[in-house]
Amino acid sequence: MTSRLRIVVISDVSPVVIKGGAERVLWEQASRLVKLGHEVRILSRSPANEAMGTVERQGVRIRHFPSDQRSLLRFVLSSILGARRAAAQELAGADADVLHLHQPLSGYGVLRSSLGRRIPSLYTFHSAAPLEYRSRRGMTGFHRGGWTGNLGMALLWVIERACLKRATRIHVLSDFSAGLLWKLYRIPADRIVKIPGGVDTERFQPAADRTAVRDALGLSAKASLLFTLRNLEARMGLTSLIRAMAVVRRSVPETLLLISGVGSLRGDLTSLTASLDLNSHVRFPGLVPDDQLPLYYQAADFFILPTRELEGFGLVTVEALACGTPVLGTPVGGTPEILRPLRSDLLFAGIDPDAIAELILKHHQLRRSDPPGYQHLRDACRRHALEYYAWPSLVNALEQVLLHTSAKREQR
């Protein structure tokens, strides 16, 4: 029988408010480890402008610590010190066998303390913090350009490097991320374990009647429906996708693209859509409620991933595949690792509008001229998700890594 682990998870994001892939990975791993019989306690920074204490959810206790949002320096320091204090208080009452750290600020606070030296740790590397910071320039008052932005990047590089050097083992979701670890921090492969992100294949599954799903969402059954779920920010490549739609619309006038998400570029993207006379072909439904997300994947003929940079993994990709929806994606980051083993012709030739439009039109034509072949592709997408990205097998692998990591405590 597997030993029962006492796991303390430390994170910069809270699983109580699911805003993106990092929160979903955190919650799926923690809640499923509890179902396997382990004790899991999460220490996370409270979401911005929300005061949260300690809550319990499906057997997982989640303790929030505050941060100071008044300036970048205050935010960084309060995140580091808040995590350190929360971990010291939590572990004073009940010890842990292993620490599981997500993101660098809270991770640094704990790994630089006596706890980090005493308890073995696994650090999950979601993405490179300094590169993420650079890509988000202008998104918030904290993400700045000029010398202030360069200083912020340098600070994050130092903090993340310290976390990676001190962690017992490092977990990545893709080979792309493992490559970044070597390129940026010279972390050797023997310290890294790869376990990809996953999908709840019971929640995300093909619809029995896609026409009924479209009716429920108020979408035409006759439309050639494209869907994407992205932060409305520059690195997501949405400008190129909208420009590609100007080309697609000329050949397939019934095409409708739904761009779900929120972000600083909402105004620019809607203005671009209007300037290209695409208001009847591109819609912005805002951030789709989490409980409706499977319906949008199910309704779509294709999910589009136009990312320009830093796609460390992309949970939306495997969620769409689990719903039987083919994903067309740019050859960026970890996306080729997911799509190429399924079918290489699901990858755009590049990130520019022409490359995106060309492949969308190719698959539109295949769908219309060969309905059985298109259905075969949908079935293959579902099988691919079931075989490689179902959460139960991935969490079993994580459990083994945590057990192996916890054993290091006896050797210290």
Image (cartoon, rainbow, N blue to C red):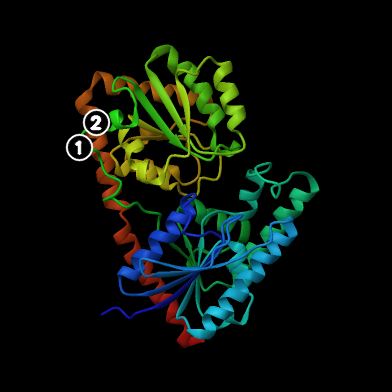
Number of marks in the image? 2
Residue most toward the right? Answer: 147
According to the image, label 2 marks what residue?
212
Decide if residue 401 is on the left or right side of residue 241. Answer: left
Q: Is residue 81 above or below residue 201?
A: below
Kind of residue at badge 2: Ala
Quadrant hosting residue 182 = bottom right
According to the image, label 1 marks what residue?
208
Q: Residue visible at 22% across and 24% down?
A: 371
Q: Secondary structure at mark 2?
A: helix
Disc 1 to disc 2, how far (Cα)?
9 Å
Kind of residue at badge 1: Ala
Q: Residue visible at 40% across and 46% down?
A: 290
Q: Is residue 410 above or below residue 380?
A: below
Q: In this view of the protein, which residue sits in the foreground, 104 or 221?
A: 221
Q: Residue visible at 43% across and 39% down?
A: 288
Which quadrant is home to the N terminus?
bottom left
Q: Position of residue 211 (x, y in %)?
A: 25, 28
Neighbour tally class for label 2: few under 14, some 14-19, many 20 plus, Cα within 10 Å: some
Neighbour tally class for label 1: few under 14, some 14-19, many 20 plus, Cα within 10 Å: few
Q: Position of residue 44 (x, y in %)?
A: 54, 65
Q: Residue visible at 46% across and 51% down?
A: 21
- Residue 111 showing in the rendered view: no
- Residue 264 showing in the rendered view: yes
Q: Position of residue 183 (x, y in %)?
A: 60, 55
Residue most toward the top? Answer: 250
Q: Position of residue 341 (x, y in %)?
A: 34, 43
